[in-house]
Amino acid sequence: TYPAALIAEEIITPGDGQLRALFVTAGNPVLSVPNGPMLEKALDELDLLVSLDLYVNETNSHADYVLPATTFLERYDVPFSFANC
């Protein structure tokens, strides 16, 4: 794992052992980490970007694959606030 603030640098720095693939789950690092514009440019240099999310956002608009996440209505463990308890 990498600190979120360093993801862009790890992608764009040449050499072996650098970040070449990224799997983002229900997040939008382009908006939530420092230096988002640099990260947005760096995402296009990845070999693979996969996103698991409910909505299209600034990060997964660069993804090679966007997989649908489940909503609370599609789960067996419904939170108590929705279970009329």
Image: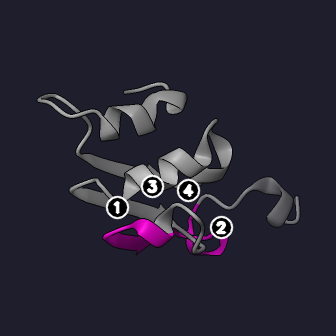
Residue 26: image location, x then y, percent: 55, 56
Which residue position is annotated with label 4? 26
Going from the N terminus, do you reach mark 1 or mark 3 first? 3
Residue 46: image location, x then y, percent: 28, 53
Which residue position is annotated with label 3? 41
Crowding at dot 4, Cα within 10 Å, few <14 / some 14-19 / many 20+, comes out as: some
Going from the N terminus, do you reach mark 4 or mark 2 first? 4
Which of label 1 and label 3 is nearer to you? Answer: 3
Residue 15 is left or right of residue 42, and the answer is: left
Quadrant, the C terminus: bottom right
Going from the N terminus, do you reach mark 4 or mark 1 first? 4
Q: Is 78 rendered above or below residue 19?
A: below
Which amino acid type is shown beneath numbered disc 2? Phe
Residue closer to the observer: 35 or 23? 35
Which amino acid type is shown beneath numbered disc 3? Lys
Which residue position is annotated with label 1? 50
Which residue position is annotated with label 2? 72
Q: Secondary structure at mark 2?
A: helix
